[in-house]
Image (cartoon, grey):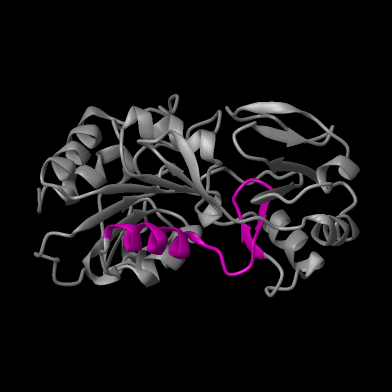
Amino acid sequence: MPDTALTPAPAEPRRTPPKLVAVDLDGTVVDYHETKSIKPGGGTPSTRPSRAVIDALQAVRDAGVPVAVVTGRAIWGAVRTADDLGLDEGFASASHGAGEYDLGARAISHQATVDAAVAVEALIDSNPSVEFAVEWDLEGWWHTKGFRRDFPARWAGEITVEELVSRPAPRLVARVDSTNAYGGPVRCPQAMRLAAGASLDAADYHVEVGYNGWVDIGPPGISKATGIARIAAHYGVSSSDTVVFGDAHNDLTMFAWAGWAVAMGQAAPDVRAAADEVAPSVWEDGVAKVLSRWF
């Protein structure tokens, strides 16, 4: 449960309805997908959105306001939950902004890529036990032999490190063993050490450190902020008229970009502090409760 003593005092609630709504997925509209739930009281996490959240997003769309997905997931994982949410049009920004999928056309609409070779070499130097996975289009995760496949995903097959760096990719994942829980509340110390040791140049790579031994590497200058900005430009909507929902550190860039940022109640204190508003937790349908103020 969130540490309410560290939750900032709420700002005056936004009253003007937004012209674009963007939602993160894991920890925002669905539970975290780790085998063991961090949900208060335990139990098995549901990776499907609740009826309350589905209906709330439909109410947004019924009002003529587009809904976008902005997630760190690969495109195929983003599309799966977008379908569960009933989003049959609009866009899903995936892979921390490096990929974009047109939900109506059912096709990739934009993709930025990075040459992974230098990053892989630096990460191996930082920790020789590191394993890798890479995202190519809609094929699924191609991964090295020791990469732990302990989460639901589309798995394309096993490849060597040499094969992995043979073509550009929108996203490279480096992973080390970790005891840190997926979903927080803090980023993984082992992954932080891996990233720090590799010292990847921000001019060449955008680096996101995750929770459970994960380090995501993508194109420089690309983030969730650039992902939602691209979608907003498509609709002719300004940042000030955009409301975003998220729960994790990789949401901070879009929090800074958007006119109104909403953090989920179970988010880490620094994520909540960066938001304009703190919603009830994902397990309390926080997204639906905030949206009901406008729609």
Q: Residue at x 40, y 53 (%)?
A: 247
Q: Residue at x 10, y 64 (%)?
A: 16
Compared with 46, 93 (above or below) is: below
Coordinates of residue 159 in the picture (x, y in percent): 84, 33
When asked about the image quadrant of residue 207, the answer is bottom right
6 vs 174, left or right, is left
Q: Which residues are magenta?
A: 206-235
When asked about the image quadrant of residue 240, the answer is bottom left
Coordinates of residue 182 in the picture (x, y in percent): 56, 43
Q: Residue at x 39, y 35 (%)?
A: 105
Compared with 97, 86 (above or below) is: above
**Viewer-nearest residue: 5 or 212:** 212
15 vs 207, left or right, is left
Q: Residue at x 14, y 66 (%)?
A: 14
Compared with 14, 247 (above or below) is: above
For residue 214, say whether it is visible: no
For residue 70, say whether it is visible: yes
**Viewer-nearest residue: 166 or 13:** 166
Compared with 228, 291 (above or below) is: above
Q: Residue 46 in magenta?
A: no
Q: How many marks?
A: 0
123 vs 16, left or right, is right
**Viewer-nearest residue: 33 or 86:** 86
Q: Residue 232 in magenta?
A: yes
Coordinates of residue 251 in the picture (x, y in percent): 44, 59
